[in-house]
């Protein structure tokens, strides 16, 4: 289930980018200006990071070198961009008011061309296969500004009036319009009505990459600084940076500044199949860094990886808007395509919780992710972004094992507290063996679940998460549970006999005693007959007769009397005859020979007596036959015994009696074989043993 990466957010330092040298050296208050250095030689643009509150002193230090800042940053970071010789850069780096001086570097959009759409479909479901649907909340990110820091965004009808004016760092006449295609594709994935995750969010283009899809560190920071200066404090916002370049502390600092201002920053991991910690902005601790997956939930072969990665999102063959033809679409692949899926999810969350902090947004996004990604190394998360972020419930508590068998574990837990009045509607239980992929059990509305079909004597890791109509919340901590050691065949056999005859599990001593006897060579027939001849089983037979014939529970005196008679050799039929011929049965039946005969047919033969049958037996009774003699004939009749023995077959073997078995057993009972013996022979049979071991 989802992991959380520790975040470090704050204004550690400020940034400057420095321009070509000129002028005399001046010392800033409280600082020492470096000696002027030769201004001859080739110059390059450098980004100068300034310590907090030292911008004026830093500017003086630059001026003392004979250089003039090209740009000043004062929002996302403090600093400048300036053209310097390498000697001047080295000298400036020693000034006490300077945090760092780094060469301006080039950043690139991170996509490659390739065919076929599916990304949105993957976001709203826990597992594959895709269901060709994308479900999202009605708010759809309304009221949230998503800053697309990219190649610009071209107008498109699917943005409606949700495309803001934005910012461009270039004076090439394109303004914020996309002359490359990358930024429009990214923005379409974030917020277009056709391809967007957050279909009501506002897109703010921040054009810092040129028509070739590249831009410098200073240009990118200029865009971030513009965002920090123009974003309304307290209003929800997301920044998407689908780009990658060399490691830059200045850029990472600028990202941290935006987060400190309350903006959630989502960045692409990079497309170099390399460690994302070695590049920027993917290494920025304050950002949500996103890798790319394919349609099989595998890490895309090009996607960067490593501990700086927070989660993955669909990034292969993603269909979105065309910058040149509003009616057309374009298919691209890259971590650039993955990042806007996550930016859109963040916008969905902020659309419902506009006051959420970046840390809360990050927790919601990573907490909703499913741990299903394959193909990444051990340093990399397996989390795949999910749009099921609303509302985010806390973890369930009290996760515990309540029962274990050889093939199942039953777990229970306590429900989490409701969030914003929304309580858990169901629960998702996930389990796995060590190192194996997670398996999701069927959702349950109860706070307990039996995981079946498990391997015997095996340990499983189990987690549970609560689900609302908006999605699945944070998972519980892992619980380890181990299935039972398999029982021996004889142990299973004894357990089944107890279950069939006594409707209970064997007590430990009884199980051990009978199992030991069987393992020592005692025939099953001997064990079976001993069990069916026991006082416990005969008590069940007597109690059944009380309920069937007298419609009441046995009284203690009567029960003990019948047990004594059966212990002295009375058969089941003779015992039942005593009930059917009794004055109590006769009175309950109506107290007349006619009513008694009719009741005899109903209780013993389970059918209605015909008029001629009633007349025949009433005549016998009136002619001197006793009720006991008549009842005994019924109880030993082929009709009655066939029904009784067939019932034993159905209960013990799961099938009806075969004709040869019927004839054999009916004749045996009629000739004096005890019913307990018949039952014992059935449970001693090879067929019964095979079915129950």
Image: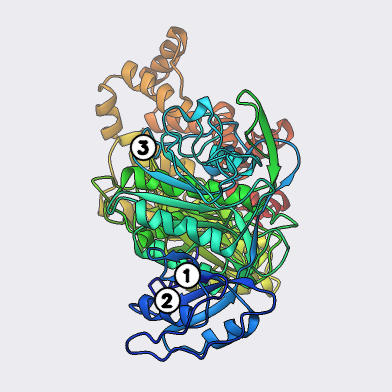
Earlier residue among tags 1 and 2: 2
Relative depth, front residue between 637 and 358: 358
User: Mark 2 or mark 3: which is in front?
Assistant: 2
Identify the coloring. Answer: rainbow
Q: Which mark is residue 80?
A: 1
Which image quarter: residue 229?
bottom left
Q: Are marks 1 and 2 in contact (CB under 8 Å)?
A: yes
Horizontal and vertical percent position of residue 387:
48, 45
Residue 536 showing in the rendered view: no
Q: Which residue is mark 3?
A: 142
Q: Residue tagged by mark 2? A: 59
Residue pictured at 50% horizontal, 39% vertical: 197
Q: Position of residue 105 (x, y in %)?
A: 63, 67
Residue sitting at x 59%, y 58%:
438
Closer mark to the observer between disc 1 and disc 3: 1
Identify the image quadrant of the C terminus: bottom right
Task: Provide the secondary structure element on which disc 1 rests.
Answer: strand
**At 46% across and 24% down in the image, what residue appears?**
606
Contact (Cβ within 8 Å) of mark 2 with mark 3: no
Query: In the picture shown, does residue 673 fall above or below 528?
Result: above
């Amino acid at each position: 289930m989802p992991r959380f990466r520790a975040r470090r957010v704050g204004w550690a330092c400020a940034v400057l980018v420095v321009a070509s040298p000129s002028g005399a050296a001046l010392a800033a208050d409280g600082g020492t200006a470096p000696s002027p250095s030769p201004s001859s030689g080739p110059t390059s643009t450098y980004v100068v990071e300034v310590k907090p509150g030292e911008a004026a002193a830093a500017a003086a230090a630059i001026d003392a070198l004979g250089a003039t800042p090209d740009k000043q940053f004062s929002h996302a970071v403090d600093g400048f961009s300036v053209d310097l010789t390498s000697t001047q850069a080295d000298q400036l780096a020693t000034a006490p008011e300077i945090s760092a001086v780094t060469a301006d570097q080039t950043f690139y959009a991170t996509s490659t061309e390739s065919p076929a759409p599916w990304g949105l479909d993957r976001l709203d479901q826990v597992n594959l296969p895709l269901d060709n649907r994308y479900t999202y909340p009605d708010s759809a990110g309304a009221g949230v500004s998503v800053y697309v820091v990219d190649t610009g965004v071209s107008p498109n009808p699917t943005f409606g009036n949700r495309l803001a004016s934005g910012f461009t760092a270039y004076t090439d006449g394109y303004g914020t319009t996309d002359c490359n295609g990358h930024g429009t594709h990214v923005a379409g994935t974030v917020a277009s009505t056709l391809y967007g995750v957050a279909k009501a969010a506002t897109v703010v283009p921040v054009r810092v990459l040129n028509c070739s899809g590249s831009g410098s560190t200073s240009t990118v920071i200029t865009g971030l600084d513009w965002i920090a200066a123009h974003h309304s404090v307290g209003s929800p916002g997301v920044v998407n940076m689908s780009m990658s370049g060399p490691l830059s502390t200045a850029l990472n600092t600028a990202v941290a500044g935006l987060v400190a201002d309350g903006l959630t920053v989502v960045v692409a991991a990079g497309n170099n199949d390399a460690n994302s910690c070695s590049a920027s902005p993917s290494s920025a601790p304050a950002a949500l860094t996103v890798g790319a997956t394919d349609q099989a939930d595998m890490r895309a072969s090009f996607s960067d990886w490593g501990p700086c990665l927070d989660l993955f999102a669909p990034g292969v063959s993603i269909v979105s808007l065309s910058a040149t033809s509003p009616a057309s679409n374009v298919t691209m692949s890259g971590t650039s395509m993955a990042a806007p899926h996550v930016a859109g999810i963040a916008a969905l969350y902020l659309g419902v919780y506009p006051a959420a902090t970046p840390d809360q947004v990050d927790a919601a996004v990573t907490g909703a992710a499913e741990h299903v990604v394959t193909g990444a190394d051990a340093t990399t998360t397996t989390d795949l972004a999910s749009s099921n972020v609303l509302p985010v419930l806390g973890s369930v508590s009290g996760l515990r094992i309540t029962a274990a068998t050889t093939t199942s574990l039953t777990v229970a837990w306590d429900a989490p507290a409701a969030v914003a009045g929304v309580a858990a509607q169901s629960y998702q239980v996930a389990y796995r063996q060590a190192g194996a992929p997670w398996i999701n059990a069927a959702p349950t509305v109860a706070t307990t679940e039996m995981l079946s079909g498990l391997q015997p004597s095996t340990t499983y890791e189990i987690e549970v998460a609560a689900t609302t109509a908006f999605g699945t919340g944070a998972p519980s901590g892992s619980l380890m549970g181990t299935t039972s050691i398999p029982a021996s065949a004889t142990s299973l056999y004894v357990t089944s006999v107890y279950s069939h005859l006594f409707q209970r599990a064997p007590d430990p001593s009884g199980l051990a005693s009978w199992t030991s006897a069987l393992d020592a060579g005692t025939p099953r027939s001997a064990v079976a007959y001993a069990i069916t001849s026991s006082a416990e089983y005969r008590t069940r037979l007597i109690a059944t007769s009380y309920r069937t014939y007298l419609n009441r529970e046995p009284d203690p005196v009567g029960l003990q009397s019948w047990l004594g008679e059966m212990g002295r050799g009375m058969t089941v039929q003779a015992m039942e005859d005593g009930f059917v011929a009794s004055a109590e049965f006769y009175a309950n039946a109506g107290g007349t020979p006619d009513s008694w005969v009719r009741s005899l047919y109903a209780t013993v033969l389970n059918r209605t007596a015909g008029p001629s049958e009633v007349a025949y037996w009433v005549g016998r009774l009136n002619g001197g036959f006793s009720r006991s003699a008549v009842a005994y004939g019924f109880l030993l009749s082929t009709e009655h015994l066939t029904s009784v023995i067939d019932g034993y077959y159905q209960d013990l073997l799961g099938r009806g009696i075969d004709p040869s078995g019927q004839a054999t057993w009916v004749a045996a009972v009629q000739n004096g074989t005890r019913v307990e013996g018949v039952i014992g022979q059935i449970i001693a049979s090879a067929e019964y043993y095979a079915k129950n071991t």
